[in-house]
Image: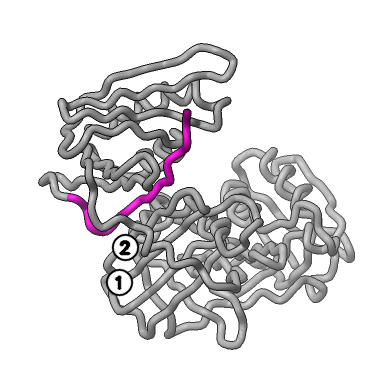
Amino acid sequence: MQVSVLQEHLAKGLDTIARAVANRPSIPILGNVLIATENGRLKLSATNLELAITARLGARVDTEGATTVPARLLTDFVKSLPAQQIDIRLEGNKLKLHCNGSSCELPTTRASDFPNIPEAPSGSGVEVPADTLHTLIEQVVFSAAKEDNRPVLMGVLTRFEGTRATMIAADGYRMAMRVAMLERPAEKALTLLIPATTLNEIGRIIRGQDGTVHLSVMDGRNQVIFHYNNIDVVSQLIEGKFPDVEQLIPKVAATSTRFDLPNFLAACKRAEIFARDANGTTRFKISNTGEVIVTAHATAGGSGSERVSAEVTGNNIEIAFNVRYIIEVLSVLGTERAILETNNTNAPGVVRPLMDDGTVDPNFVYLVMPMSVR
């Protein structure tokens, strides 16, 4: 194998696949990156057997070939190089890199020993605009569980029905659901439980990008493949039944509080300074005179309190939430105003974005359980 590639292209490709490299590989080769030529391009692949990412780069291919090398050594060396051309050559069991007077030799393992990574099939699946998919992921994935006490909650329930796409995530304390309409209907209805970690990677790859993401499910394999431009992401799906969290959404609200999102978010962030060592406990005293008093007490002493103007209809109420759960949802809504709907101190609160005309956006709902305080 003999290939020439620009340093910035190789560095970006290695960064793209980095999250799929196993940190503590049970099989040594899982700590390697596969480097191969393919149709006049350079292909980089990494996998930890749960997630696999492949990136294809423009390059000058003089001689075809494939091998694997330690991912960390290769990445660190490439990132240290200047933004110039890198010449790569496979000689025996060594991969040699040369760039502007700098060179290195890396040990190799045969490409045939690297796990097989399936490629996206053509002509089937679902097409989702990159910006639409990014919004779905960004507004939902943060609500998935971070610990594996209940593995199904570490996934995001993803449904495609005609032109309707839905993502739902929950961790037992909160739930986020986002609906989006697709330009092209799905060929068939799909219900998938995709690991939140996989969707975080997809979101990172497509952030700020145009184009279309092609999503497909491998026949006979519990895997989903995302294809975007020159990148493939292959992920195992989570098995199990996702709980019917939609039934928990209250149908009515005794108190509706409309507020300017930036001001309310700023007040919550200041409250977190005092609440962070008290499990985030923050009280929201909502008055139909038109204000919300946000108060938090530090365990070791000290407190913060702030009044925020709001449009309140219904009953007065004082309710406590983990303020981090409020901050996280307000940080991704992307609107200037939002609404908090409550019923009583023991019932969940519901946060929804408000559209420019003041109406509630029907395509997003966030449910958060209250905290018990004395």
Residue 56 visible from this viewpoint:
no
Q: Which residue is mark 1?
A: 164
Magenta range? 360-374
- In the image, residue 270 sits, relative to residue 135, either above or below, namely above
Alpha-carbon neighbours of circle 2 within 10 Å: few (<14), some, or many (≥20)?
many
Q: x%, y% of residue 345?
A: 36, 39
Question: Which amino acid type is shown beneath numbered disc 1?
Answer: Arg
Q: x%, y% of residue 6?
A: 60, 51
> Residues at badges 1 and 2 in contact (C-beta under 8 Å)?
yes
Main SS, magenta region, reads: loop
Magenta-span inclusion, residue 247:
no
Out of 77 and 172, give the one closest to the viewer.
172
Q: Quarter-wise, where is residue 28 in the image?
A: bottom right
Magenta-span inclusion, residue 362:
yes
Q: Is residue 149 shown left or right of residue 206?
A: right
Question: Which amino acid type is shown beneath numbered disc 2?
Answer: Val
Q: Residue at x 27, y 67 (%)?
A: 181
- In the image, residue 297 sits, relative to residue 231, either above or below, namely above
Q: Quarter-wise, where is residue 92 in the image?
A: bottom right
Alpha-carbon neighbours of circle 1 within 10 Å: few (<14), some, or many (≥20)?
some
Out of 155 and 243, give the one closest to the viewer.
243
